[in-house]
Image (spheres, rainbow, N blue to C red):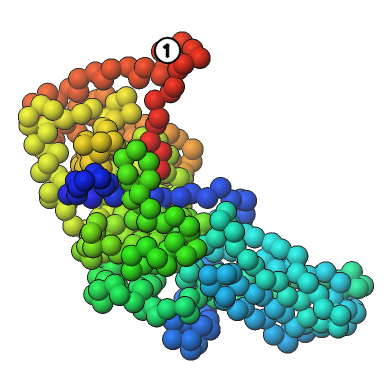
Amino acid sequence: MILPKRLTVGAFALILVTVIVFTLAVPVEAQKGATPTPGLVKGGPTGTPAPVQAPFTPQPSPEGNGGNATWTVQSMTFQSNYPNGFDFTIDVTSSGGKIANAMVLWRYSPKTRTRRPAEVDASGTRATFSFRPVASDAVPQWVGIQYWWVLQDEAGNTYETEHQYTEYSDTVRPWQRLESEDIIVFVEQGVPPEMGQSILDAMAEMRPSFQSHWPQPLPYKPRAIIYNGFTSWAEWSPGAGTAAGATRTVTIGQTSDAWGATVQAYAPLYVDVQETAYSIVPHEIAHLYQYANGGATGDFWFFEGNATFFEVVGRDFMLDRVRELARSGTLPSLQGGGPSARGESARDAYDIGFAFFVWLDETYGPEAHRNLWTLIDQGKTTKQAMEEVTGMSFVDMETAFRTWLGATNAVAPTPFPTPTLFFPPTPTFAPTPTPRS
Ligand SMILES: [Zn+2]
């Protein structure tokens, strides 16, 4: 999630946010540290075969695969019918007889795996499955897809095919596709043409920072899908671009580790190329790194400030703002949940959190960030991890941070206790909503 550094206040007080979604998925075998390997897919934006890097490393077929039979795969095909899903087809024979059961499995990232029984035709040599997404399992166009089949013949032999790569291509409209060693970017026609290269440049600029600060690399190459406005986003995600809630909030992006991707709307009313490319995308990719390194849990300021630490532009602006709060004696404490993430103070959580990670970096070096996330990945809370890495109690650590900022009141004023912890439960009690995500 990200808030603009310059809030646009209009008649509807629109606030722009992007949302990160951590899909609860069936846990599957971890592929941490896996190195992407080259692959080949058909159906790029031009409709011609395009070499792409596989989204993540495949597993080889299991040992002793196929039982006593000899299996011959004539073809495995994938057809995108975006926005209406995709079709899988396999033509295969077994010396053990006709295919009796066929299951197709696919994943968009190592976080998820979907399996569906397929139809086997009368010949017993062809199986097909058509995926027709509904709201709960819809995915953006251009997600990467790894798929494979598990088959059983009449004699009971089981065979798992090799894994194939493809993309959920959108042939409804023209797209620009760009790829670097950091990211794969898809830009819808109508977005300013410099968007794609700007994102590649931003990610390249932050590459040393991503590499030096994260203990685990992403186990896939992330994707950024940039829409021209909201129409083609709403095509698969109904309601995208609609102002919602009491604050008339418009969500301009969404990030999911299940997709291994972030989608962002280019909407000049809200956000420009510079902000999308140099702030939002690196920020959202940092959220993906968080999830690959133990998860984005803890106080809002912690994981939003941490993602903001990977933004390219606005760093001096944010740091100056926080230093000014410190000098004027109005810097909110990190205790008690930390700075506000709501209303007019909504930037506080981002900017102060950002400043915290600058302090951590300048004081202890990038290894402190790596150690911090290693501890989080091992199950420590963010507070425990911060105390262990700095060798200080949380309060002493905060005093050191505030002193570094030049606070006139380096020892943070004790925040009011969180009322939810002390109220007796009553029928009318409504807990204070805690921002998460
Ligand atoms: Zn965020």
Residue 257, horizontal then vertical, whole percent: 47, 55
Tag 1: residue type? Phe
Residue 342, horizontal then vertical, whole percent: 28, 36
Left or right, 241 with reference to 339: right
Q: Is residue 149 above or below residue 18?
A: below
The quarter of the picture where residue 334 lies is top left
Quick one: label 1, few (<14), some, or many (20+) residues within 10 Å?
Answer: few
- Residue at image x 47%, y 71%? 142
Quarter holding the C terminus is top left
Mark 1 lies on a secondary structure that is loop
- Residue at image x 35%, y 49%? 243
User: Residue lying furthest front in this view?
Assistant: 11
Q: Is residue 433 above or below residue 56?
A: above
Residue 215, horizontal then vertical, whole percent: 40, 52
Left or right, 94 with reference to 148: right
Residue 309, horizontal then vertical, whole percent: 26, 50
User: Residue lying furthest right in this view?
Assistant: 155
State the residue in front, 263 or 409. 263
Residue 35, visible in the rendered structure: no
- Residue at image x 23%, y 50%? 4
Q: Is residue 265 above or below residue 338?
A: below
State the residue in front, 47 or 328. 47
Q: Is residue 50 above or below residue 106?
A: below
User: Residue lying furthest bottom in this view?
Assistant: 48
The quarter of the picture where residue 333 lies is top left
State the residue in front, 177 or 343. 343
Q: Which residue is mark 1?
A: 423
